[in-house]
Image (spheres, coloured by chain):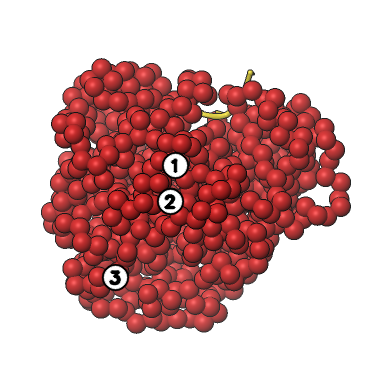
DNA sequence: AAAAAAG
């Protein structure tokens, strides 16, 4: 991929890659992907059985999408396993093993070769091209290899050097693009170098971890813990997890054994600290995953308490890293309190995370939602003997896109995740679906932890291929084979929508997201329209009309076009309305640093109509700006078709 | 105005 290399070159040297000729997907080289293998391979079979055998496993976040423009040709969307993954028997024998090898290998790296990256801050460390460029330690390197992380994802390429340089970081990258590994690698590296220092590490009674990773839900903490454990295998780094809903005794015992990296949800963490079984005084690394959520209303006080009033070293004496797929300005502003001279990274446009997710919105009255869902699921089920699931036939970019989500015989691999508004609604839909003969299970915060985990296990394994969920499942969870996310009730917040649909289309694979839009969702019309347009999804005309009707666009409901990569609020103009949730700041004609928004505007004005029509980018965007304290670099022209092309190339019809 | 996070 020569044109990709133009991007990964040294940051010191501005590169001006030549624009590749646009090549229609059907004319592209047949060896483009080698992803999407025949699912009858022994590897696939084995991975499936592993899933049944170890259902509690967490999975690495993988893959990503980069391009936002949809295809103009008929394509086949499959959700089958990628071919790249190869089983590693040795890794399978590890005590921490699970079926993750299939996932880590399932990353479709080609799907996110060229995406815009914005990096701001002082003296930003250069991105890396390969893991080998950074001294991560032998054991960690070996684990990375075992996981088949052959090549870093963009967020990893950019975030790891920053983190390894000891810099604070605020990072914004698409759902499923490998954020967990991006913060785990540097932490494990740093901790394994420190842990041999003789400094008093606390006695048996009070555990003093060197690193703390906070996340907003128990299941997500669990997942991060499981994944980090794999990365830390053989490094001597000790991990522990702390979350509520489960007896604290075992977790405390694990703390006593010594812990270098603690993964936790806030409540149980505070509990442990107040019991004086845990101290944060030795913390050198603090990570907030889903950071915007963690600093959202309802969570902020708790996080502030942990970070500012619990003996944790202040900013500057610890390294703080914040990660999320979404980062509203007001949250950035708040988060700055926790950071010291930080680097801001925005990898790809958040909205473009949906590039591989076909988004549909349907106008459905509340009363009609259930029958409509039934129709949808019935079509998907194809009379119960489901070897092929013909899911959607949608119009995208004026062209008919026949998207066939096809699975290898087993129904359980077509997982459908249904989001609802309330816990009660989740219960009701669960039992209603069950009565209608659809194997569904619900997950929400009123269930006891065991039920929650059981529901997730049952869903992951395919035993219950329909999961009805509240927002407890909207963030971070990496569930392979989720082919369809249905927003039975739309969320109030467009960011929640982004996270919800991000449960599908992970690891560079395609996915489908269907939303039932009712009158109650009018306030979402504008931001939803903008998001879909950014991802070049077909926006129904009725939705556009709602969006245009200013009556319905409540203040703060919209996002500025082009904000989707996230913008460093420090670059924003103070004069700009603070209330504008997604105010993108002061990039203007005089700004030395073009914003990603400007970047796309430039793309739209190029003369190469054909190229632009299809890929919505241009050679104009292939610049490298390196100012003293800010740099924005854009990749070569986006290969929006890339992952579709690999599908087509692999012979799917 | 819902959900999540301690018990």
Mark toward the start of the polypeptide (2 vs 3):
3
Give x and y (percent) for residue A616. 27, 66
Give the distance between the C-alpha atoms of the residues marked 2 and 1, in whole angstroms.
10 Å
Marks 2 and 1 belong to one chain:
yes
Q: Residue at x 39, y 52 (%)?
A: A43
Q: Chain of mark 2?
A: A
In this view, the residue in front, A533 or A648, is A648
Give the distance between the C-alpha atoms of the residues marked 2 and 3, in whole angstroms.
21 Å
The chain painted yellow is B
Q: Chain of mark 3?
A: A
Which type of secondary structure does the marked residue at label 1 adopt?
A: helix
Which type of secondary structure does the marked residue at label 3 adopt?
A: loop
Which residue has dot 3 on it? A31
Q: Is residue A5 above or below residue A547?
A: below
Which type of secondary structure does the marked residue at label 2 adopt?
A: helix
Q: Is residue A441 above or below residue A86?
A: above
Q: Is residue A370 above or below residue A34?
A: above
Q: Is residue A613 above or below residue A396?
A: below
Q: Residue at x 28, y 55 (%)?
A: A38
Marks 3 and 1 belong to one chain:
yes
Give x and y (percent) for residue A8. 48, 73
Asked if disc 2 and disc 1 are in contact, CB closer than 8 Å, the reply is: yes
Which residue has dot 1 on it? A50
In this view, the residue in front, A349 or A519, is A349
Where's the N terminus of chain A, which quadrant? bottom left
Mark 3 neighbour density, 10 Å: few (under 14) some (14–19) many (20 or more): few
Which residue has dot 2 on it? A102
Mark toward the start of the polypeptide (2 vs 1):
1
Image colour assigned to chain A? red
Q: Residue at x 56, y 38 (%)?
A: A221
């Amino acid at each position: 991929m020569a044109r990709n290399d133009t991007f990964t070159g040294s940051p010191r040297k501005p590169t001006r890659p030549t624009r590749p000729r646009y090549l229609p997907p059907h004319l592209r080289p047949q060896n483009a992907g080698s992803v999407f293998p025949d699912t009858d391979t022994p590897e696939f079979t084995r991975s499936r059985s592993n899933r049944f055998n170890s259902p509690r496993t967490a999975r690495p976040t993988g893959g990503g999408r980069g391009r936002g423009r949809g295809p103009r040709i008929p394509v086949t969307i499959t959700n089958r396993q990628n071919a790249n993954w190869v089983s590693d028997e040795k890794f399978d024998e590890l005590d921490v093993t699970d079926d993750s090898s299939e996932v880590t290998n399932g990353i479709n790296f080609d799907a996110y070769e060229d995406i815009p990256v914005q990096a701001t801050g002082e003296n930003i460390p250069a991105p890396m091209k390969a893991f080998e460029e950074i001294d991560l330690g032998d054991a960690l390197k070996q684990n990375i290899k075992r996981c088949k992380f052959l090549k870093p994802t963009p967020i990893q390429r950019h975030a790891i050097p920053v983190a390894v340089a000891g810099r604070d970081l605020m990072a914004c990258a698409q759902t499923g693009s490998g954020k967990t590994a991006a913060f785990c690698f540097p932490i494990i590296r740093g901790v394994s170098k420190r842990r041999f220092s003789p400094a008093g590490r606390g006695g048996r009674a009070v555990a003093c971890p060197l690193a703390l990773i906070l996340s907003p839900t128990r299941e997500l903490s669990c997942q991060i813990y499981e994944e980090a454990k794999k990365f830390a295998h053989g490094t001597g780094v000790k991990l522990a997890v702390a979350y509520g809903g489960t007896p604290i005794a075992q977790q405390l015992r694990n703390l006593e054994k010594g812990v270098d990296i603690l993964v936790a949800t806030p409540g149980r963490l505070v509990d442990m600290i107040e019991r004086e079984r845990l101290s944060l005084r030795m913390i050198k690394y603090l990570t907030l995953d889903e950071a915007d959520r963690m600093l959202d209303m309802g969570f902020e006080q708790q996080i502030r308490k942990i970070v500012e009033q619990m003996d944790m070293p202040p900013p500057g004496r610890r390294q703080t890293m914040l990660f999320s797929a979404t980062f509203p300005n007001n949250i950035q502003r708040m988060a700055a309190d926790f950071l010291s001279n930080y680097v801001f990274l925005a990898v790809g446009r958040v909205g473009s995370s949906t590039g591989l997710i076909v988004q549909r919105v349907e106008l459905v009255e509340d009363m009609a939602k259930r029958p409509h869902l039934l129709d949808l699921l019935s079509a998907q089920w194809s009379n119960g003997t489901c070897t092929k699931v013909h899911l959607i036939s949608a119009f995208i970019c004026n062209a008919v896109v026949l998207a066939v989500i096809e699975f290898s015989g087993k129904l359980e691999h077509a997982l459908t995740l249904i989001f609802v508004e309330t816990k009660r609604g989740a219960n009701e839909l669960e039992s209603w679906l069950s009565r209608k003969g659809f194997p569904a299970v619900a997950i929400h915060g009123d269930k006891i932890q065991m039920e929650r985990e059981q529901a997730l296990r049952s869903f992951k394994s395919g035993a219950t291929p329909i999961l009805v969920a509240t927002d407890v499942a909207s963030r971070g969870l990496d569930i392979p084979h989720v082919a369809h996310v249905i927003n039975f009730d739309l969320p109030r917040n467009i960011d929640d929508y982004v996270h919800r649909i991000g449960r599908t289309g992970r690891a560079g694979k395609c996915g489908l997201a269907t939303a039932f839009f009712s009158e109650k969702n009018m306030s979402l019309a504008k931001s939803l329209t903008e998001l879909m347009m950014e991802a070049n999804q077909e926006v129904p005309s009725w939705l556009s009309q709602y969006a245009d009707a200013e009556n319905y666009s409540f203040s703060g409901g919209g996002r500025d076009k082009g904000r989707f990569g996230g913008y460093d609020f420090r670059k924003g103009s103070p004069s700009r309305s603070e209330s504008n949730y997604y105010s993108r700041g002061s990039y203007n004609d005089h700004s030395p640093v073009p914003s990603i928004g400007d970047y796309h505007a430039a793309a739209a004005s190029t003369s190469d109509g054909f190229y632009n029509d299809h890929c919505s980018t241009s050679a104009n965007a292939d610049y490298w700006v390196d100012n003293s304290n800010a740099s924005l670099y854009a990749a070569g022209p986006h290969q929006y078709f890339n992952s579709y092309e690999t599908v087509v190339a692999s012979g799917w019809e």
